[in-house]
Image (tube, rainbow, N blue to C red):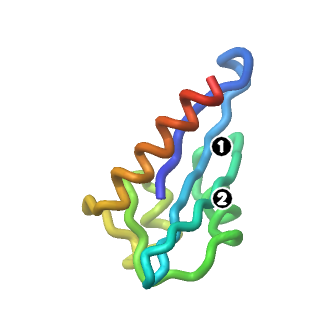
Amino acid sequence: MDELYTFVGKKSKRYYVWASIAVTQYGRYFYFYHLSKYKNAGALFEFNEQLPSTDKIYCDGCFSYDRIYGSKASMEKSKITNVIENLNSQIRDLVL
């Protein structure tokens, strides 16, 4: 799970794109996105409502993850970390 900051048209129109990839036990990827005006626990909670339940969350050190997921949140790197960072790069390239 990760978030990225972007803007539409001009920098005063700031948005955050929350992105998550759910991986099944068979290795199938499912992509989820949420657009928010804020990068806070409330915005992450709204996004979390759309996501399937999971046993572990791989994320960076954003304060909101620990607040919402507690012990499920892991700040360690995984192979999915590269996939989500690549996804963020693609979003930036296509949107901006």
**Residue 65, position as x, y percentages in the image:** 47, 62
User: How many circles with numbers are drawn on the protein?
Assistant: 2
- Residue 44 as seen in the image, left or right of residue 8: left
Residue visible at 71% across and 40% down in the picture: 37
Q: Nearer the viewer, residue 85 or 49?
A: 85
- Residue 54 as seen in the image, left or right of residue 18: left
Q: Please, which residue is most extreme toward the top here?
A: 10
- Residue 45 as seen in the image, left or right of residue 89: right
Mark linked to residue 42: 2
Q: Nearer the viewer, residue 30 or 51?
A: 30
Q: Which residue is mark 1?
A: 38
Does residue 92 sit above or below 3 in this rendering?
above
Does residue 5 sit above or below 23 in this rendering?
above
Residue visible at 48% across and 52% down in the picture: 2
Quarter of the view holding residue 13: top right
Q: Secondary structure at mark 2?
A: helix
Q: Secondary structure at mark 1?
A: loop
**Residue 30, position as x, y percentages in the image:** 58, 67
Mark linked to residue 48: none
Category of crowding for the residue at label 2, using alpha-carbon neighbours closer than 10 angstroms: few (below 14), some (14–19), many (at least 20): few
Quarter of the view holding residue 20: bottom right
Q: Are the residues at dot 2 and dot 1 in contact (C-beta closer than 8 Å)? A: yes
Residue visible at 62% across and 40% down in the picture: 16
**Residue 38, position as x, y percentages in the image:** 65, 43
Q: In which quadrant is the C terminus drawn? A: top right
**Residue 51, position as x, y percentages in the image:** 63, 71
CA distance for labels 2 and 1: 8 Å
The kind of residue tagged 1 is: Tyr
Residue visible at 39% across and 70% down in the picture: 73
Q: Nearer the viewer, residue 22 or 64?
A: 22
The kind of residue tagged 2 is: Gly
Category of crowding for the residue at label 1, using alpha-carbon neighbours closer than 10 angstroms: few (below 14), some (14–19), many (at least 20): some
